Amino acid sequence: MTTFSLFRSMLRIRRIEEAIAERYGAQEMRCPVHLSIGQEAVAVGVCAALQPQDGVFGGHRAHAHYLAKGGDLTAMLAEIYGLENGCCRGVGGSMHIIDLAAGFLGAVPIVGATIPLAVGAAWAAKLRNEDKVIVVFFGDGTFEEGVVHESINFAVLHRLPVLFVCENNLYACYTRLSERQPDRPIHAIAAAHGCRIFTAEGDDVEAVHAASRMAVADLRAGGAPVFLECSTYRWREHCGPNQDDHLGYRPSGELAKWESTCPVSRLASTLSSSPEGARLVAAAEAEIAGEIASAFAAALASPVPQPADLPGYLYA
Amino acid sequence: MPEIERRITQAEAIREALAQAMEEDERVIVIGEGVPDPKGIFGTTTGLQQRFGKARVFDSPLSENGITGICVGAAISGMRPVMVHQRIDFALLAMDQIVNNAAKWHYMFAGQVKVPLVIRVIIGRGWGPGPQHAQSLQALFAHIPGLKVVMPTSGYDAKGMLLAAIRDDNPVIFIEHRWLQDIADHVPEAPYIVPLDQALICRPGQHVTLAAFSYMTVEARLAAEALAEHGIEVEVVDARSVRPLDMSTIVESVRRTGTLIVADTAWKTGGIAGEVIAGVAETAFSALKRPPLRICLPDIPAPTSPHLTRGYYPDALYLARAIAAHLGRSIPDAELADRLFRTTPHDVPQREFRGPF
Ligand SMILES: Cc1ncc(C[n+]2csc(CCOP(=O)(O)OP(=O)(O)O)c2C)c(N)n1
Ligand SMILES: [Mg+2]
């Protein structure tokens, strides 16, 4: 994966999330949204190390993971709008997204809920001798759920091909990590569980990618489960399209510090240092803007879903 | 001088109850994910940590089962914890501690140890929460001997029942409804108690008993007002508690009206509405002039899209039509629809509705 394609994938996610934020106030997307702005490098760096047959699970903040794994953009937007062409036909909304064709195996908002599922998927892959790695993304807060530890223990016990990716953005909603966990690295707990550990600056997509490639190669070779902790930061409010720094739950200057190491714009300026690079960056911006405009138009052209169809989804 | 009727929202009433409980009993502590944060659990815990300190008002790691067990441990050791989950769905992670420990600790040690624990959980409807964030699980808790389960509707009852729950020596599941929290109501300032086992007849009527739970009481009252204009007098009973159910108030009402309709916020199958009907059938079968009726959610999880939730949650118009049809009364539908026309979209609260209850 070239630096440019890593950049382009991040830029695309950033612009999509911004476009969602811009339109959210119209009250036509009637579901909670947890945006990934600021955290794109983790999703992109990890997913770029995967093959199409590999599987990814997410949680409440999953747009970036879905998109980075190749999830269909129009279907995600239609889902957020609650329309029939949505990736779950309007049943789920932003917090419940899935694209099986792309290997995005599902995201739901109960924190921790998909971690055992990822382990189960990796277990099945091993039992069935499939060449498949499973990744699950989750936050620093989610690491506090008991089921996470039960799952990691099982994964290590059975040496399953699973990559746990902890996006440590320092907060769970409005509560800082130091109010929720003692002062020790999260990955040290995973190490004690027996995982192989990688850490990466989560705003450095190439670092995340390099770590992920090693991790995935290891897992394919039958290595122990890997735990990758990435430091990162959520720029917008926990849930919703706005800034929320005025609430005062984060020290002043903290957001500005992270914005100054923006994974997207830093790489944009590096790439733009040559005229050819600058041309590519500008072209990517234009292409992405076009793609987003047509995806919104296509999503909004979807028919509305029918309540009468719901009972049919209940049982197989 | 008569007290000027003080009106505050239910969220404020709950916050006041928590503050007064903490004032009157230093064993009371408050814990939950987000309790001291800027949103303060929809305003119900705002300012409590500033007022009572970090030694009594706590944020929580995302560890529902563990924290519940920790609160049970504190409760059997001299504290009176009040836990809160922003959504009832998160309490599902704590079912083991709630059902296996909290509900049984007093019983299985033959009454030697008490568990004075309150678990506040919030339910809701509409505006996109979807399958995992909008469940009404009162029946799940009400099935468990050893738990008390309440669902106040008015701000007045929310305050009085929360104070009663905190003073109670048993685990109480205190179910709040998001759509009730912003409604203003008469709530006296001084502490008072509303019992945890008594239904309230909030509108008398001789033709039909409409027993309603939580937010459905609001829709029930609107329906009753509309039907009264057509000569149908609905007795609205706000059930208020789920376990124990106050069957005697409901049965007495049915003896007067001969007709029972139950409106619940939850699914029909295995729900509390069926329990109410069973209780009436067992004790006052001959008082029933016609089959009872349950008005509940369809037996499918809540979808997210507003196109799919349209019609999922029964509202006042749905209730009025169902009641009229059940009584065999034909009311021009346009009149009901006109009377109960909502000025707000179907998936947000009827903000113009301000009680009184
Ligand atoms: C079991 C459960 N408890 C609580 C919540 C409410 N909740 C949603 S997101 C969240 C914070 C998650 O924090 P983290 O895992 O760090 O992810 P981030 O939001 O920072 O990406 C909480 C508490 C939930 N959805 N599920
Ligand atoms: Mg976090």
Image (cartoon, rainbow, N blue to C red):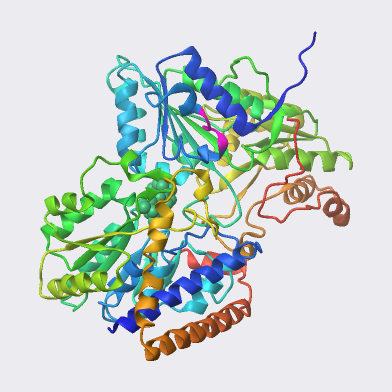
Residue at x 20%, y 45% (from the top left corner)? A184
- Asked if residue A141 lies left or right of residue A129, the reply is right
Residue at x 33%, y 27% (from the top left corner)? B72
Residue B244 image point, x, y percent: 52, 26
Residue at x 29%, y 68% (from the top left corner)? A204
- Quarter of the image for the N terminus of chain A: give it: bottom left
Can residue B246 be seen here? no
Residue B31 image point, x, y percent: 41, 31
- Asked if residue A150 lies left or right of residue A265, the reply is left
Range drawn in magenta: B43-47
Give the vertical position of B296 relative to A88 (above or below): above
Can residue B238 be seen here? yes
Residue B145 image point, x, y percent: 41, 29
Q: Nearer the viewer, residue B204 or A28?
A: A28
Give the vertical position of B165 relative to A60 (above or below): above
Give the vertical position of B62 relative to A8 (above or below): above
Give the image quarter of residue A108.
bottom left
Q: Residue furthest bottom?
A: A276
Residue B285 image point, x, y percent: 64, 32
- Asked if residue A166 lies left or right of residue B263, the reply is left
Could you tell me what secondary structure mostly forms the magenta stretch? Answer: loop
Q: Nearer the viewer, residue B342 or A167?
A: A167
Give the image quarter of residue B256.
top right
In magenta segment, residue B282: no
- Asked if residue A175 lies left or right of residue B231, the reply is left
Label count reads 0
- Quarter of the image for the C terminus of chain A: give it: bottom left
Residue at x 24%, y 70% (from the top left corner)? A207
